Image (cartoon, rainbow, N blue to C red):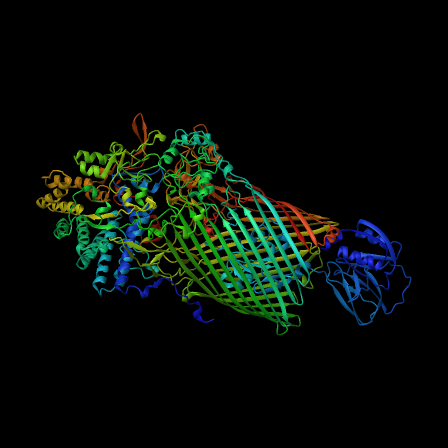
Amino acid sequence: NKTTAQNASLSLSVNNMTVRNVLKNIEKQTGYSFIYSSELIDVNRRVSLDEQETSLQDVLDALFAGTPVSYSINDDHIVLSRASGDATGKAQPQGHTVTGKVTDGSGGPLPGVTVVIKGTTHGTITDANGVYHLADVPANTTLLYSFVGMKNKEIAYTGQSAINVKMEEETIGLGEVVAVGYGVQKKSVVTGAIASVNSSDIGNTSVSQAQQALQGKTSGVQVINASGAPGAPIKVRIRGYSSNNNSNPIYIVDGIKTTDISNLDPDDISSMEVLKDAASTAIYGAEGGNGVVIITTKKGKSGKPTITYDFQYGLQSVGHTPKLMNTSQYSTFMNEAGLISNVDQTYNTDWLGAIFETAPMQKHHISFSGGKDGSTYMLSMSYLNQDGIVVGPQDKYKRYTVRLNSDHQILPWMKVGNTFAYSNSQRAAINESGGEFGGVIGSALMIDPATPVEYTGDVPAHVQTFINNGNPILKAPDGNYYGISKYVFGEIVNPFVTQAITKGSTQQDQLQGNVYAVLTPLKGLTITSRFNLNLTYQNYHTWNPTYYYTAERNNSATKVIDNNDLWKDWMFENFASYNHKFGEHDLTLLLGISAEKATHRITNAQGGPMIMENPAYAQLDFISSQKNDQVNGRIDDNRKESYFSRLSYNYKDKYLLEGSLRRDGAGLSQLPKSGRWGIFPAVSGGWVISNEDFFPKSFITNAKLRASWGQNGSLSNLGNYSYASLISSTSNGYALTYPMADGSFGTIFEPSQLENPNLRWETSVQTDVGLDLRAFRDRLTFTMDYYNKKTTDLITQNTPALEAGNAASPINAGDVTNKGFEFELGYRNKIHDFNYGIHLNMSTLKNEVTYLNPTLDRLYGAQVGPGWTATAVQKGEPLWFFYGYKTKGIDPKTGDPIFLDKSGQPTNNVTEADKQYIGSAIPNLYYGGSLDASYKNFDFNVNFQGTSGNDVMMGWIRNDRPTINRPEYFFKNRWTADNTTATEPRAGTNPKAWNSDLLVFNGAFMRIKQIQLGYNLPKSLMNNLHMKSARFYISLDDFFTFTNYIGMDPEAGTNNNNNNNIGIDRGTYPTARKVMFGTSISF
Amino acid sequence: CSQSFLDTTPEGSIPVDNFYKTDADAKGAVLGVYDILQSMYAYDWDSMWMLKTLLSDEIYTGGGHRGDQPPYEEINEFRYSSSNPVITWLFQMSYWGIYRANLVIANIKPESPAKKQAIAEAKSLRAMLYFDLVTLWGKVPLVTEPAASPDQYNQPRAAVADIWAQIEKDLNEAIPDLPLKSQQSAADKVRVSKGMAQAMLGKSLLYEKKYADAAAEFQKVIDSGEYGLISDYSQVLRKGQEFGKESLFEISYSAEKNYDWGNFQWGNNGRNTESNIHWQLCGPRGDGWFDGGSTGLVAGWGFAYPQKSLWNAYTAANDTVRRNAAMISEKQLIAKGGKLRNPDQNNSYPWGCEGYIRLKYGSWADESNTNATSVKELNYATNIRLMRYADVLLMAAEAYNRAGDDAKALPLINQVRARVNLPALTSSGDQLFADIKNERRLELSFEGVRFQDLVRWGDAKTVLGDQGKMIPEGTFTNGKEDYMSISGAGFKDKNVLLPIPEQEISVNPQSSQNDGY
C-alpha cells in the first residue's frame, strides 16, 4: 500500500555500506523503487547511518547530505537526480542530451514529472518550470514520462534535441472496468446506470450476508432487513417496487445465476455491480426486470502467494424496544375497558426485557492466492457463527464456506478455469412467522405484564387445575412452572413456552460453481463456453414435544418431521464477443445462447409418536408406530432457453452507442406454449462531452451524458403450471379424499383452477437519463440519473366473480410505475498524511399503480390479525398501500375515534366500504453516505443509511383480542373522562380503531450503520514479522438509530418475499446493535 | 436446443382433455362436489352449520371472550354486513360445488350406469346447493355450465322462480338414475340416493308452497320403506347411527387422519381436511370452566352454547326426552361429576353461556380418534345430517296440513312424537300447523333448519326480533346473570335474505344488492 508506505517510518543502521545497498534496503522496507542513473549518481559511495523510526525523507536527506543529489518521491518510485545547477561533468555523456518542457492539459508547467528511458533506470525529473534535461540518451530509445494523476506518455527518441510533452490527466476511476452482462466494460464507455461496490467497501463490516454490503452504499438500491434474525433472508429492491409479488433482483455470481447469495462469504467478493437501468439488464431479458446484481469473486494474481486472514468478533444486543404498559397500567386500562375488573398485580413482567440477551458472533476468513506460469488460484475458507439476541439456542446461524477459483492459460489462445464454492449452513430460527398469531416477539408484545415468565412462588389456581388434570405444563430450566396468562388467550403464548417447544433447524449444503473455457483464436474474438451448476440440499428437521398451555395451545402427541429439498439447477452458456477497431471506430459484437433447467425436488416425511419423548429419539426410525406416518413429495421443473446479442459502438471515446436484444423462451411449467417466447430489446447512448474540442477547460475533467431505454421481463412470479387447469387428486401435497361410509377413503379428482391460456410475461420498460461528472482532478465525482420504469402485465392473483366456481389462474392485470432521481456525490482528497473521502447518495422514488384490470377494483394483500386485509393494490396508489379505516382525531365526548367515510366526511356508521388509503411503506426518499478518513496508521469510517416518507403499520395489535397488552403510548395518550382532548382512543374502544390509521406510524429512520476505527501496524514492524499488512479495528455497527416509530424496528417488514407485507411490524425480529472487534492480516 | 426442451409435462395431474372418460373418473369427479360440502359445513370458522344455527334462536356465539370471532357474532346478532367473511365464503363455496357439478354434467357422457348415476348425483347436489342459495340469498346467478372463458365468469342474478325451476328440473332428472339407499354399497351410502333426491324435491316444493306436489314426493320416500325412526332419540346424531335407517343424507367426516397441531390441514379452503374441526370450536370452554365429568364431552373453545329459551320451550312442551338429549343444565352436569363454573374467574360461566351445554352435535370424546396418542381436538368425525327421516315426516305432515289433508298429516307427526313418549296430537288446521312448527323446533334443534323454517313461515321477525340483543357474559351480579346489551341487534325485515357479498358486487358489474344492505 503506497499511501501507507509514504507515511511509513523506517529504521536503518548501516556501517560503511555502499549507497547502492542502502537504496536496496530502503526499497525493501518501503516498497518504493529507486530510479536513477548510475552515471549521474555515485552509488558506490560508502556511508554509515543510524536512523531509528525516521521518516523516509529524513533518511534520504541524511543519505545524500553534502552531495549534489536531489530526490523526488513519486507514486511508487523515487527518482534520484542531480540537483539543478550542478554540472560537474563527472561522467562523459555517451548519447545526446534531451531537454524539454512538460506541461499539463491546460499548458501549465508540470514540475516533478519523471522522465526515464524506458526499460532502464536512467532518468530525471522536471524542475519547478516543468523543464527537464536528460543527458546521455541513446538513439532509438523511448522516453517515458510519468506523473501521478496523468496518463503515462511515451515518446520515441529519434534524435530530437528538444521534446516538449503535453500530458493528459488520467481519470483514474474511468480507467477501471466494470462487470456488465456477459463481459466487462471500461467505466468510461458505459452507457447504462451501473453502481459498483468493491471489496474495500465490503471488508471490515459486520455483514454476514453480501447484500448487506450494498445497504446505503449506492443510490437506487434499497436493502431491507426484513428480519434481524441470524441468517434471515434479505430483501433487495432496485429502483423501487416493480412487481406486486416477489421483486428481488437476480444475482449473477461469476456467471452463475442465483436468487440466493446467503451462502457467499462477503470477504470472497471482489466487486458487486448493480445494474439498474434496462439497457444494462436487458441482456438478462426475462429475468432482469427487478434489476441484476453481478458479483465477481476474488481471483488469484500471478506472483508471490498471498495469505490473508480476517477475524471478527462481536457482541450483539437489542436496540430500541417499545415501552409497554406495566401491570398497574394494564390493570387500569382493562378495567376502563370493562374487560377485566381486577387484574392480579402479583407480577409485573417486562417481557421485552426478558426475551432479549447479549449474543456473540464471530467470523473467520482465510484465503490463499497466487499464481505462476499462467495459472492463478484463490482458495478461501470461512466460518461464521452468529447467535441471535433472543434468549435460548433457538436462533443461531452457522456457516462454513470453501471457495476455489482458478484460471489456467493452457494455450496462447485458450484459457480454462473454474469457480467452485461449497457451503454448509445451519440455521435455527425462533417462531417469527407466527407474528401476531403466536410468534415469539409478537407474543412478548401482546401478553399481559401480570403473567410472570415463571412462577417463583405458589402456582396460581388456574395453573394448578391444569396440573391436577395431568396436563404437561412446561417448566423452566430452574424447575419453576412457566407462567400461563389468565387474561390473554388464543394463539398468544408465553414466549418462553414457544421457545421451549421450538426444536427445529435447517441445514443446507450447497455446491455452486462453474467450469469454463475462453478461446481467443483471432485477434478481437473471444469465445466463452461455460457450464454452471447449483446444487443445494436442504433439510429441515424438528420434533414436537408434548406440552399444555391452554385448551387452544397444547400438543398431546410427539412427532418427528423431516422436510428435504433438493435444488439442482444447471445452465449452459456459449457466447462470443468480437471487437474490431477501424480508424476511430471501435465496434464490439456479442452473440450468445444459453439453456437452463432448474429442478426442485421436495420430500417431506413425518411420523410419531416418538418411542420416548427425548431428543435422542427424534428421528423417524424411533417412532412407536407407523400409523401416523405422512409423506409427500414432488418435483418442480422449470426451464428456459435464450438467445442474446449486443452491439457496442464507440467513436473516439466520445460517442457511444449500444443495443442489445434477447429472446427468451420459458418452459411449459411457467408459461403456456402460445405466450412463452419474449423479446427484450434495449438501446443506450453516451456522449462524453468533455472529449469534445469545444468543451472548455475548467475544473470539470470528465463529463458524460447517458440515455437508455429497454425492456425486461420477470419470471419470478410464475411456476408450477399456474396458468393451466389440470385435474388433480392432491392438493398442497396431500391426497384429496372423501371419507366413505365404510371407513374407506374415496379418491377425488378436482380441477386445479380456472385456466388462463393468455398468461404472458411481466414486462418492464425503463428509460434512464444520466450524467456523470468528474472534477478537480477526479477528486470530486458526481452522478445523477432520472429513471422511469413501468412494469406492465403485472401477474396478479385473479379474483373472479364468486360464481366462477374455482380459484382462477393468475392474470396479467396491472401496471406499476417507479420513477425517481438518483444522486451520488463523492469527494476524496488528501492533506499531507490525512486522507479522507466523503460519499453521499440519495434516491427519490415515486411508486404508483397506473392501471388495474377493471374487473378487479383492487387486489387484496396481507392479513393483519384475523379478518383485516390491511394492504391492497389500487389504481392511483402506491403498491400495497395500507388499507383500513381513516380517522380524524378522537371524539372528545365518547373517546372513540372519529371515523371518516370514503369521501372524507365523519361518519357514525363506518363500514367496510369506507376502508381506504391510510399509508404506504414505500419511502419517497432513501439515502446513505459514508465518511472515511485515514491519518498515518489510523483510519476511521462512518456510514449511515435512512429512509423518509414511509409508514410502518403496528401489525401486532389485533382487534379480536381486546385484552392484549399495548405500548404505553396508547395508555398515556388515551382518552379518559379527564383527558378528553386525547390523541388515542379510550380503553375498550370500537374494535374498528385497531383496523385503522391509528396503527400507522411514520417509519422514517436514519441508522448509523457503522462507526469504525482502524489501526495499521507500521510497515517496519510488519517486515520483521514477514507480513504485508495488518490492521486491527473496533466498530459499532447498527448502533444508533434515529426514528419516531414507537414499535420495535422501523426497518420492520414481515419476513417473506412477497411485497404485500412490506412495512407491517408483527413483532419483527429487530436488527441487533453490534460492538465489533476485528483484524485483517495478510502475508 | 430443440423446442421440446421447453415442453415439460406436469406430474401427478391430468390435462382436462384426457379426463372425464371412465367410470372411475366420473366417481372421482362427483366426490369432488361432496368434498366442497364437507368444507362448507366444518371448515375453520366459516361453517354453514354455524351460519344456519347462529341465525336462529337456538344458540349464542360464545367463544373465549367477546370479539373472539366477530363475524360469527355479527351473524348471531343480525348485525352482519355484505363483507362478512362467513357469508362471503359460503356464497363462494356454494358455487365451487356447483362448478364441479357442472363439470360432471357437461363432460361425462351417460354411457354407463355408473356415469348416469354420477350425473344424477351431480344434479342432485347442484339442486341442494341452489336450494340454500335461493332460500338464504334470494336472487343469485344461475350457473349451469362451467365457464369456458374469463368473459363468462360474471353472471347476472337470476329470478327466484327460475332458480326454483332449475332445482325441480335437476331433481326430477336425477331421481330415475339414482339407486335406492338399500342398493348402495356400504361405502357409497355417503352418496345421494333416490330417497334423498325425492326428499329434497319435496322440501323444495314445500318451500315453493306447492303443498300437494310436495306431499306426493314425501309420500314416495315414506312408501319406499327405506327409512324409519330409531328408537333412542339421543342417538340420532351420534356416530353409532351414521348412515342408519333414519339417515337420508350425511356429510361425512373422518377421525382416521390422526391430525395433530403440526399436520392439521388449515387453509386451502378445507379441501384437505377430513375431520370436523368445528366440533372443537363448539366444545364448551375448558380453561378452568367446563369439565365434562362422566358425560363424555371434551372441552373445546366455547362456541355455540344453547339458549335457555330453548330449554324452557322443551320444558313447556313437557318434552324431557328430547330436552335431555339436546342439552344439559349445570345441575345435571354437576350430577355427572362435571362443572361449568370457573373458581378463578369469580365462579362465572364461560363467556356466552347461559348455564346450559349442548349435547346434540356435542364434542364427544368417542366421536374423535380414540387412539391414546391422537389429538382429540382435531379429529372429530361427527357427520352432519342434512336430511333425516323425522324431518321428512314433519315436512310431509306440514305439506298435507297445508294442502288441507290433516288426516294424512296427523299420523306422521304423531309417529315422531311417539318416539319421545309424547302424546298423540289431534289438532287440525292452523292449530295443527302451529303444532307442527313447534314440533320441528323441538325435534330438529341445532340441526340447521330453524332459520329457513322461520323465514318461509313468515315468523322470523316475531321470533327473532330480539335475537342477539342481550348476550350472556357468564358473570353474575348479586347472583343474577349479567348480559351485554348489543345495539343494532335483532332480526329486521332485510334479514329475510343475506346480503350479496361485497366482493361479488365489486367484481361483477351485473350484480346488485338485496334490499336493505
Q: Is residue A998 visible?
A: no
Q: Looking at the rendering, which quadrant does residue B457 occupy?
A: top left
Say which quadrant the N terminus of chain A sits in: bottom right
Q: Is residue B465 above or below residue A148?
A: above
Residue A72 visible at all: yes
A593 sits to left or right of A205: left
Closer to the camera, B247 or A773? B247
Q: How many marks?
A: 0
In the image, is residue B112 above or below residue B402?
below
Judged from this view, the residue extending furthest toward the left is: B407
Q: Position of residue A665 (x, y in %)?
A: 46, 66
Pick out the residue farthest to the top. B478
Q: Position of residue A615 (x, y in %)?
A: 45, 47
Q: Is residue B112 left or right of residue A249?
A: left
Of A802 and A473, the residue lying toward us: A473
Residue B422 in picture, x, y percent from top left:
13, 38
Left or right relative to B458: residue B281: right
- Residue A293 in picture, x, y percent from top left: 55, 58
**Which quarter shows the C terminus of chain A?**
bottom right
Identify the image quadrant of residue A407: bottom right
